[in-house]
Amino acid sequence: MLFFSRWKTLFILGLVVLGLLLAAPNAMKADTRANMPGFMQNTINLGLDLQGGAQMLLEVDLSSVERQQLANQRLGVLETFRDPSDGGPRIRIASVAVRDNVVIGKLRDVADQERALVLLREAVAPVDPRQPLSPPSTVVSPRGADGFEVRITQEQIEFVQARTIDQSIEVLRDRIDPQGTTEMTLVREGDERILLQVPGAKNVDEIKEAINKTANLSFNMVHDDSNDERKLRTAQETGETTTIGTVYRTFQDGQGGGGLIIEERTRITGECVENASPGVGPAGQPIVNFSFNFRCSRLFGELTAKNIGKRFSILLDDEIITAPNIRGAIPGGSGYIEGSFTPASAATLSRLINAGALPAKLKIVQENTVSAELGDASIRAGQVASIIGLIGVAIFMLLSYGFRFGTIAILALATNIILIAGALTLLGATLTLPGIAGIILTIGMAVDANVLIFERIREETHNGRPPVNAIETGYRRSLAPILDANITTMIAAVTLYFVGSGPVQGFAVTLAIGIVTSVFTAVVFARLLTATWLRGTRPKTLPI
């Protein structure tokens, strides 16, 4: 085990040099790094507790999701009866409304009840469309002799809630960090909360704006009853959702304050928008340009071709941005949104549309801001602790195993720290305060392997073996227990990473990297140093 071929020696030294090159930028100033090769410009990403930033606990409004599910079911009932799948005549409805979280309907003709129930049951979809054998999303049952009710199952509610949390996390990630360079943390907390951490956040208000804006974009036709002042006034007074449409009282830009009656059925949603960008309109006003994907471009062309002379509205979060007249078919699948925009608000809206709409509103229930000064203090404290720990371990190894073997252990330990820094830089991992604790723990653990090896060498020397044989036997017989101890620790680190979140994961990452590098430096690099010293001095007795 003490023979190293030239290629093996070059490979080991090459890994050490590579680790040194990757770790070196962390000790350089920004101006110096800018003049280095590309791979030497990267540094370790610092977490929220080290470089400061914002931390928020967000609560997802899941009740609104359930209300939307009920509204969708109501519209599904209307469409099912308007265009029956059995090819028969339309089923006439006296009323259909949502009451006590149930869609309740009443038919005009008692004889239609059985057929209506069959059509509704045939339209029931599974909870998860990707798994046809999953439970049904709704339960349809008769109500009296001429009615029906559609109830959403608990499995559907739980599925939609979980999907809403996941979608909210993805949308927030695209909104706050579209380039993926912030190393922010977005994890689920409990059943209805999301933990958001943005290291190095400079503008907390901008983050809040991205959170508070649902950005639910939709294109709805304006109902003809909007031109009838009496019907419009009646609809505004009742505020009821009918088979005709929903009343929206105001324009976002303050135009036409009388309001409009908007058709309930959403023709095109924000999901159809392939790209949005800020621009300048014909009159020099800020606008938002948009283009639809292929499928919705065709739908938009058909919609405008069939409704020339009518109006359609563009809604953002249930507020009408604009409601222009359709002067002709728009087959190109592109257009622009105009309103009371500023250049900044147009750019913000474009970014929100591109990121997608949040499936539910988010409420900030807890907010903390960590200053950069606290992070600097944590880094300095970690550095001091690391240096003290390193010096303590070095003194112990020198006193326990003498100058030569103690120096080998110290060189292996210093190389281990360099390799940890290089690996963190290469992987782009985020270093947090618990991560620093993991590195300090690694300093103490790293010498365990050297202690096992040196104690075995000392034992073999006391048994009368010559130096070469004692060192060879010491390294060979210590390998198995070293691997056993580090494998069990690695299992714990991997478990912490996948089960934990945030700072716990940061600790697990540095611990796992430290385990790999400590085994390499203690078993491979230290053995190379020992073999080199042995060949150079050829001692008759070992100073251990």
Image: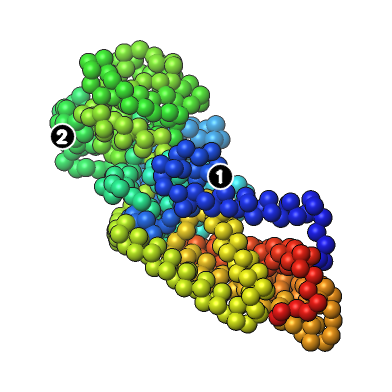
| Secondary structure state at the residue bearing disc 2 | helix
- Residue type at numbered disc 1: Glu
Give the label on residue 122, or none: 1
Label 2 to label 1: alpha-carbon separation = 39 Å
Q: What label sits on residue 233 in the rendered view?
A: 2
In percent of width and height, residue 385 lies at 44, 71
Residue under the point 84% across and 85% down: 464
x 36%, y 20%: residue:
335
* 268 w.r.t. 334: above or below: below
Indicate the position of residue 514 as horizontal and vertical percent values.
59, 64
Residue 340: which quarter of the image? top left
Residue 39 in percent (x, y) is at 55, 42
Earlier-in-chain disc, 2 versus 1: 1
Q: How many marks?
A: 2
- Which dot, 2 or 1, sits closer to the camera? 2
Left or right of 19 on screen, residue 251? left
In the picture, measured across the screen, residue 171 lies left or right of residue 494, that is left
Q: Which amino acid does label 2 sit on?
A: Arg
